[in-house]
Image (spheres, grey):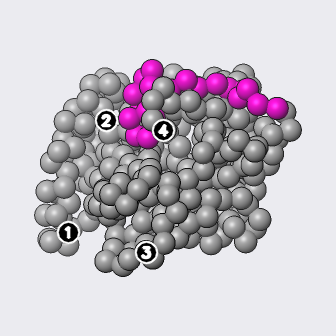
Amino acid sequence: MRIVVLAGGTSTERDVSLVTGYRVCESLRRNGHEANMLDIFLGVDDSEVKTFFTEKNDLGELSDNLKKKTADIPAEVKRRTEARESFFGRNVLELCKEADMVFMGLHGSNGEDGKVQATFDLLGIRYTGTDYLSSAISMSKELAKKVLVPEGIPMPKGVTLHKGHKIEYVPFPCVVKPCCGGSSVGVSIAHNEKEFEDALDEAFSYEDTVLVEEFVDGREFSVAVLDGKALPVIEIEPLEGFYDYKNKYKAGSTKDTCPANIPEDIASQMQFWAEKCCQAAGVTTYARVDELLDKNNNIFCLEINTLPGMTDTSLIPQEAAAVGISYDELTEKIIEISLAKYE
């Protein structure tokens, strides 16, 4: 198959996406596909289009070169916005139309929030992962709570705060996070008023809506759901602090245990809630649900990641490996499940 691995973009998770794209594209080539990685925002020159699918370029070098351009992205976003130019880079939509499948290696805004998926639906472009609506619901922590809590899914109590508004009562400690962020970017734990104000400044620097939630003192877990079925639970133990951006993507920053060392009944409950989250939000194909377990063995679901990372330190490949699914088998399964949506 001819496959475009779409990565990069303009979100705060751009560099992580490029690593995901690089690893996925390598895997798809090993599986015999004509695959190449494409930066959704930067695109490729006309001279590269003809040989795009057949070129055996050095993907690691491509990923590194694209990362070097990250610092220039904000200025280019501003220029295109003012000029009313397309978000999509040169030849991106044309190559995606030519492909048999687009593997979504994007993370964060303009990738994981349903906008690209909606565009592809209108253009008849096939892509991996769930649809635009479930992507949008899952990306917005505010909207996800409104969908999941009425279904009985346990989640930390919290309130939404808009920029310029005040919150009357803050139960410390609390967690402050951007409403639509990912990879724990902009997430802080506040223990007092000063830390809370600093946390708000940090979160509001990313977007105009933030979530203030009760702090759950507990262990951190994640459960991947592949084709509607939960994989083994994985426990994430940061060597210091909490599971923030640095700990997620710096090798050796966490101790990951899969299957998690917890009683079987608790693991089953976590898997049940992960599947329930996906069902309630309409998420299909694959996803990852982050959960907490407090000292009284109460489970709290935090969020649904509809395009979970596929880097060397990512969780879903580890969970798949625990049931005998290799990385290459995982990427192939995602392709197969995604193809079935269009039959």
Judge the density around disc 3: few (<14), some (14-19), many (≥20) Cα neighbours within 10 Å: few
Query: Of callouts 1 and 2, which one flags the residue occurring earlier in the amino acid sequence?
Result: 2
Disc 4 and disc 1: Cα gap in Å?
A: 36 Å
Q: At 76% from the left edge and 31% from the top edge, which residue is drawn?
A: 262
Left/right of residue 240 with respect to residue 71 in the rendered view? right
Tell me if I can see residue 125 in this picture.
no
Specify the segment rendered in magenta. 244-263
Tag of residue 167: 3
Amino acid tagged 4: Phe
The residue beneath circle 4 is 242
Q: At 60% from the left edge and 50% from the top edge, which residue is drawn?
A: 216
User: Looking at the image, how many numbered discs can be counted on the residues?
Assistant: 4
Q: Nearer the viewer, mark 1 or mark 3?
A: 3
Tag of residue 51: 2
Q: Is residue 201 magenta?
A: no
Q: Which percent across, then down, holds residue 87?
A: 28, 62
Amino acid tagged 2: Thr
Amino acid tagged 3: Ile
Judge the density around disc 2: few (<14), some (14-19), many (≥20) Cα neighbours within 10 Å: few
Question: Hey, which quadrant is residue 235 in on the image?
Answer: top right
Judge the density around disc 4: few (<14), some (14-19), many (≥20) Cα neighbours within 10 Å: some
Q: Which percent across, then down, holds residue 33?
A: 51, 31
The residue beneath circle 1 is 81
Disc 1 and disc 2: Cα gap in Å?
A: 31 Å
Query: Of callouts 2 and 4, which one flags the residue occurring earlier in the amino acid sequence?
Result: 2
Left/right of residue 210 with respect to residue 330 in the rendered view? left
Q: Which percent across, then down, holds residue 140?
A: 50, 65
